[in-house]
Image: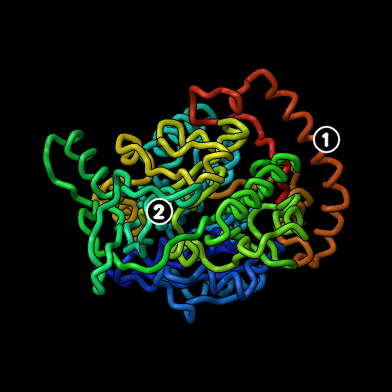
């Protein structure tokens, strides 16, 4: 099939804007557009600019609309493909809009980062898409297992996580250890070169590239490093920052978040010559994908050393001057690995599905708070990479799958996967809509549904949690799936 397909992403929250724009920006020859539908989670103008930076999507190809305009806009534009990019209830609501169109596009859904463990709700809400995009072989297996367990067989296709593509790295003339003293000898993974002025400069070897190559060789019996960048040009500039990727969901407990804040203060005091950058997703008054409690701006208020700063720039920009990244379980770790930035995935509070960090088991990236203060960052083990987001580009066949589905739809051979009507009838439908749109839903039925539905959903949630007791999949470290509701109590309503 030739290029030129009209592809529209429908999104609201900042992380889904970044993911969908990056995914569409990676496909040559299409006509992409991004619809930002107004909900309580919709990215602000500043968040939109940050999310679009480096994605390859033209900011002119973005439209902001209210929910009621979505159906008419799609009807007029007649896209070949719609990428549903939002939290589960948003995807379900927009799926109903697609169901109303006279010219039905292929529908694609996905998640904006690492999706281990594969959660029941994540699949259940997206089960009526024509295709579910996943980003690693491990995720392929997990969602296949989950689908078999809950009876939701959704076709999946592998994509390269947009933030995992190899890029040129701006590098510091210092080794991986960025605090607690600097030894005279560069550690493994660094090599000494000469700057134009003749002074020695230590430049990092892109470990993930050679690792991907060696893994491919052992798996395929060949020396090819297809899909890996074996030798990228190195640009040099100061890269001394310790960057912390803050997350709204993990850890949940205030005392644990306060411990992280204290660790960042200690790290700043340990080396006043380096910046400790707390990378935040939203400014005061802005929303983000997940509700944040006990924000780091609050926890650090009045106790920040001068070299501990907040940043709202894109993660790609923050990593340009990063000598190391700290996170609990953010996809920023994958973005850092792709750029050759060493990482500590913080395990001071354990490694569990409820911390969303079991994906790092076997990676070699797990480390504690004392290692953060000392700056003992690390690169991933080669054996972990291929199964976890760094597969060869040739294995990312999601777009070929989309083109095949478009051909089937045009031939009338692809049955529609329609979102079924809510079991509670029109009032239940109004509840679904109002839960997603919040104040943007100005209908009387929406207000009534919210008034009646809020206490009802609390009861239903308690019943479901009771029924799922004993399954224990959130505590089962031997699988990559969960069957119970997640423990975060992270309502989409704000």
Q: Where does the image place residue 186, in percent across and percent down from the top left?
A: 31, 49
Chain-order first, disc 1 or disc 2: 2
**Among the 4 quarters of the image, the one containing residue 271:** bottom right
Q: Residue at x 40, y 47 (%)?
A: 135
Q: Where does the image place residue 429, in percent across and percent down from the top left?
A: 72, 52
Q: Residue at x 68, y 24 (%)?
A: 468
Q: Where does the image place residue 177, in percent across and percent down from the top left?
A: 43, 48
Q: Nearer the viewer, residue 344 or 59?
A: 344
Classify residue 64 as left or right of residue 433: left
Q: Is residue 356 in sight in this rendering?
A: no
- Quarter that holds the N terminus: bottom left
Q: Nearer the viewer, residue 285 or 108?
A: 285
- In the picture of the structure, the residue carrying the numbered disc 2 is 341
Q: Where does the image place residue 66, in percent across and percent down from the top left?
A: 66, 72
Q: Nearer the viewer, residue 378 or 107?
A: 378
Callout 2: SS: loop
- In the picture of the structure, the residue carrying the numbered disc 1 is 459
Q: Residue furthest top?
A: 470
Callout 1: SS: helix
Q: Residue furthest front?
A: 184
Q: Residue furthest left?
A: 222
Q: Nearer the viewer, residue 431 or 458?
A: 458
Q: Is residue 221 in sight in this rendering?
A: yes
Q: Residue 15 has which mark? A: none
Classify residue 152 as left or right of residue 258: left
């Amino acid at each position: 099939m030739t290029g030129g397909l009209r592809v529209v992403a429908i999104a609201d929250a900042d992380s889904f804007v970044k993911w969908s724009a990056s995914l569409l920006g990676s496909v040559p020859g299409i006509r992409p557009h991004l619809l930002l539908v107004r909900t309580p989670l919709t990215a602000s103008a500043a968040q939109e600019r940050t999310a679009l930076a480096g994605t390859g999507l033209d900011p002119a190809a973005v439209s902001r609309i209210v929910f009621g305009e979505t159906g008419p806009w799609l009807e007029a534009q007649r896209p070949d493909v719609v990428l549903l990019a939002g939290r589960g209830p948003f995807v379900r609501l927009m799926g109903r809009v697609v169901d109303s169109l006279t010219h039905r596009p292929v529908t694609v859904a996905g998640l904006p980062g690492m999706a281990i463990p594969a959660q029941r709700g994540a699949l259940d809400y997206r089960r009526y898409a024509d295709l579910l995009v996943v980003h690693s072989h491990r995720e392929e297996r997990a969602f296949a297992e989950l689908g078999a367990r809950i009876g939701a067989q959704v076709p999946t296709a592998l994509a390269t996580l947009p933030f995992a593509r190899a890029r040129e790295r701006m590098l510091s003339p210092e080794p991986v250890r960025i605090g607690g003293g600097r030894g005279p000898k560069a550690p493994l993974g660094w090599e000494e070169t000469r700057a134009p002025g003749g002074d020695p400069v230590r430049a990092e070897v892109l470990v993930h590239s050679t690792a991907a190559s060696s893994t491919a060789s052992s798996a395929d019996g060949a020396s090819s490093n297809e899909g890996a960048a074996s030798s990228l040009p190195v640009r040099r500039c100061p890269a001394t920052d310790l960057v912390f990727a803050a997350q709204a969901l993990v850890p949940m407990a205030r005392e644990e978040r306060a411990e992280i804040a204290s660790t960042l203060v200690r790290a700043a005091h340990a080396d006043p010559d380096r910046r400790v950058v707390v990378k935040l997703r939203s400014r005061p008054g802005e929303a983000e994908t997940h509700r944040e409690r006990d924000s780091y701006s609050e926890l650090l208020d009045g106790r920040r050393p001068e070299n501990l700063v907040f940043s709202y720039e894109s993660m790609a920009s923050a990593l340009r001057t990063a000598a190391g990244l700290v996170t609990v379980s953010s996809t920023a770790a994958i973005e850092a690995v792709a750029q050759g930035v060493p990482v500590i995935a913080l395990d001071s509070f354990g490694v569990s599905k409820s911390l969303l960090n079991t994906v790092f088991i076997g990676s070699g990236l797990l480390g504690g708070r004392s290692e953060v203060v000392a700056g003992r960052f690390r690169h991933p083990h080669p054996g972990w990479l291929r199964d976890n987001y760094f597969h060869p580009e040739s294995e990312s066949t999601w777009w070929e799958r989309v083109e095949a589905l478009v051909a089937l739809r045009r031939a009338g051979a692809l049955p529609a996967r329609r979102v079924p009507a809510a079991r509670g009838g029109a009032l239940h439908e109004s509840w679904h809509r109002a839960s997603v749109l919040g104040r943007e839903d100005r209908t009387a039925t929406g207000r009534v549904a919210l008034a009646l539905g809020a206490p009802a959903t609390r009861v239903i949630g308690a019943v479901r949690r009771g029924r799922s007791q004993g399954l224990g999949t959130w505590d089962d470290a031997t699988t990559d799936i969960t069957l119970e509701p997640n423990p975060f109590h992270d309502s989409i309503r704000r």
